[in-house]
Image (cartoon, helix red, strand yellow):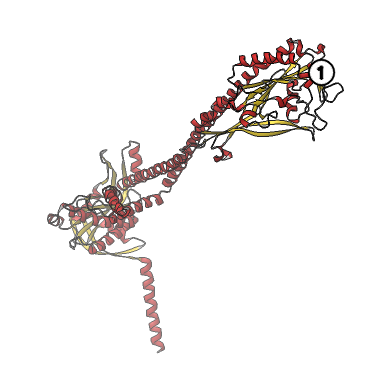
């Protein structure tokens, strides 16, 4: 199936490739006549890949020549590419960073909102402690409890349960007072019900001298669905200042007038309860008294004027369920890990150790690398919570890769377009310079009239013999193709001998030496003469497409001229003067396959220091007591080579005579 689709795909793309190739062919071919037939248009429906390759090769070769001869063009394109890449990369990176920062900022804001929600819930859950604290201060039935319990280990104080476990005190005779318990349960029940926390507040505790005396409800079945319950009786008698896990929170509470919250913790009073029951926050408030009342709790050398503590137990599972944290993060495509750090007193080192534990974690948090999480400290009551948040798809811009790739491709394309435009512009410049000299172009650009005088130049003009009858037997396209092919060869010879082509008029070819670049008269005559000799040789070997020979005649004259640019619409560089007319006369009166030169040119060539030119005598005319002589240019030989040849011949003759005499 796939093998069948490929040819169909190539077939469907064939017209597009044909169009592109033809466009390239138009750009590539230096000659517009190479692929024009008499009866066919340039665009051929029967496209071949070979034609495309040839066209592309020609175009690339032409571009390469321009690039090599003008290195500033690729440098400009490369600088443009570098600038575009830099601008695009910086811009895209800035947008990507902004995207990432915005996404991280949204995650942080959402995490902080989550922390604020928990703080508000915990703060609301701690309000009952202030009411309970005021009740302790107002009701005398609670005033003597601290003195009855006393400091741990002192005479007259409530003893430890046993000598090995010193974090529990025996307060049964003190805290089992029926009147006190009834009053506490009544007050605690009112406070708990008025809090309206939806079952989050599961217990209120009374801690005179920082020792748990009683709790309401002592066995909580009302806030849990059967068979679950919370048994708080195990906490009665717990001395917070002697318990390593509770000491830090107790000391922090005694030294503060605010509520201090710890958790979520695993409650020790109900070891057999499931985690959903015993995982809770513990919030404590110091019942501070005026110093003159004699209440005093001493810890590590510090004294606190405090009756003791009141405590609230807040269910973590209830708050977590009300927060809807899992669904909220999931709906935003985020994962989280909520953790806390607790400080526990180490009795061995007498220092506090920190322990970090995970409170809640989304289902797919472990599938995301740790480097993709962003950690935030949450503003909870005791500010020891940390939440790590991460996006399922990461915070990086998902479009960064293809945006970079696209920008690089576009930068390269734009740079290539610029390179092609610069090459095309340079081609136009080269074309204009071929038509008009650089000196004249500068004057035209300044809106100046281009007129220059030259004292001594040599003008050449040639014509094809019998061109009128020849063209009558050929189609116009073939005539143009024949002239283009022939004149291309002459242009190469003009470049070879450094002569300036003025123009072609029909089958006539006109060029000049000594203009627009000034040279000596002898040098200009020499260039034109050598050009004329090579031109005759080239013409003898030239054949049309039908195999027909062509014959020409040519004329040369040296003298002064005026050169300039004529017109503003399609301006043309041309030459004027009697010298041009005489050169045309030399051509018109010349013989087939010969170059007739005037007497002025003959004198310049006769005295040439580098070449020895041979001539045949031409016409001799008299006009107003002046004799006009013309000459037909024969051959040219370099005088240096001729001198060496003569020297070699003399040596051979002398040597032959010497050998003969010896014999």
Residue 75 against residue 199 in the figure, above or below = below
Is residue 130 at all visible to an observer of this figure?
no
User: In the current view of this chain or complex, which residue is farthest to the bottom?
Assistant: 663
Give the quadrant of residue 142. top right
**Which is more toward the observer, 567 or 647?**
567
Q: Which residue is mark 1?
A: 148
Is residue 631 at all visible to an observer of this figure?
yes
Residue drawn at x 27%, y 46% is 574
Q: Is 567 positioned to the left or the right of 350 in the image?
A: left
Residue drawn at x 36%, y 61% is 609
Residue 94, image x, y percentages: 50, 34
Residue 185 against residue 280 in the figure, above or below = above
Residue 639 against residue 93 in the figure, above or below = below
Residue drawn at x 49%, y 35% is 96
Pointer 1 local density, CA inside 10 Å: few below 14, some 14–19, many at least 20: some
Residue 546, image x, y percentages: 17, 61
């Amino acid at each position: 199936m796939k093998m069948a689709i490929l040819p169909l795909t190539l077939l469907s793309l064939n017209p597009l490739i044909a169009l592109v190739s033809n466009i390239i062919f138009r750009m590539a071919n230096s000659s517009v006549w190479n692929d024009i037939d008499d009866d066919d248009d340039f665009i051929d429906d029967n496209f071949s890949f070979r034609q495309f390759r040839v066209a592309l090769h020609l175009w690339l070769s032409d571009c390469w020549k321009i690039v090599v001869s003008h290195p500033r063009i690729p440098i400009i394109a490369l600088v443009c590419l570098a600038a575009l890449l830099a601008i695009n990369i910086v811009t895209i990176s800035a947008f990507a960073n902004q995207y990432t920062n915005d996404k991280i900022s949204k995650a942080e804001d959402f995490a902080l909102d989550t922390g604020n929600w928990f703080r508000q819930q915990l703060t609301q859950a701690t309000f009952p402690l202030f009411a309970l604290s005021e009740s302790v201060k107002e009701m005398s039935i609670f005033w003597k409890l601290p003195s009855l319990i006393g400091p741990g280990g002192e005479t007259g104080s409530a003893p430890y349960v046993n000598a090995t476990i010193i974090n529990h005190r025996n307060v049964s005779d003190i805290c089992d007072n029926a009147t006190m318990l009834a009053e506490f349960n009544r007050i605690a029940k009112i406070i708990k019900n008025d809090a309206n926390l939806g079952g989050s507040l599961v217990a209120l505790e009374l801690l005179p001298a920082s020792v748990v005396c009683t709790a309401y409800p002592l066995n909580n079945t009302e806030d849990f669905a059967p068979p679950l319950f919370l048994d708080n009786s195990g906490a009665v008698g717990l001395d917070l200042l002697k318990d390593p896990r509770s000491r830090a929170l107790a000391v922090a509470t005694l030294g503060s007038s605010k509520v201090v919250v710890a958790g979520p913790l695993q409650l020790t009073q109900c070891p057999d309860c499931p985690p959903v029951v015993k995982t809770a926050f513990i919030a404590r408030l110091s019942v501070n008294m005026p110093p003159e009342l004699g209440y005093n709790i001493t810890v590590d050398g510090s004294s606190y004027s405090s009756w003791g503590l009141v405590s609230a137990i807040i269910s973590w599972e209830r708050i977590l369920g009300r927060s809807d944290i899992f669904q909220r993060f999931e709906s935003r495509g985020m994962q989280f890990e909520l953790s806390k750090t607790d400080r526990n007193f180490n009795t061995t080192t007498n220092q506090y150790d920190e322990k970090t534990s995970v409170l809640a974690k989304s289902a797919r948090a472990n599938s995301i690398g740790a480097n993709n999480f962003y950690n935030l400290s949450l503003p909870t009551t005791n500010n020891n919570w940390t939440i790590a948040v991460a996006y399922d798809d990461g915070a990086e811009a998902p479009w960064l890769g293809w945006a970079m790739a696209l920008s690089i491709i576009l930068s390269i394309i734009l740079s290539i377009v610029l390179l092609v435009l610069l090459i095309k512009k340079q081609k136009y410049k080269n074309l204009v310079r071929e038509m008009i000299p650089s000196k004249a172009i500068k004057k035209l650009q300044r809106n100046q009239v281009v007129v220059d005088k030259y004292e001594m130049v040599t003008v050449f003009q040639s014509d094809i013999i019998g061109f009128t009858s020849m063209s009558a037997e050929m189609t116009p396209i073939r005539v143009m193709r024949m002239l283009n092919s022939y004149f291309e060869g002459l242009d190469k010879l003009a470049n070879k001998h450094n002569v300036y082509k003025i123009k072609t008029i029909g089958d006539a070819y006109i060029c000049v030496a000594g203009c627009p670049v000034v040279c000596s008269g002898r040098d200009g005559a020499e260039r034109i003469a050598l050009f004329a000799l090579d031109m005759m040789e080239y013409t003898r070997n030239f054949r049309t497409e039908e195999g027909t020979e062509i014959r020409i005649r040519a004329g040369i004259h040296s003298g002064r001229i005026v050169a300039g640019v004529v017109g503003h619409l399609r301006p043309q560089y041309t030459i004027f003067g009697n010298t041009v007319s005489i050169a045309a006369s030399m051509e018109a009166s010349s013989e087939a396959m010969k170059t007739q030169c005037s007497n002025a040119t003959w004198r310049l060539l006769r005295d040439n220091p580098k070449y020895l030119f041979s001539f045949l005598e031409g016409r001799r005319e008299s006009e107003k007591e002046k004799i006009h002589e013309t000459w037909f240019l024969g051959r040219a030989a370099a005088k240096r080579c001729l001198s060496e040849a003569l020297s070699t011949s003399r040596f051979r003759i002398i040597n032959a005579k010497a050998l003969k005499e010896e014999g």
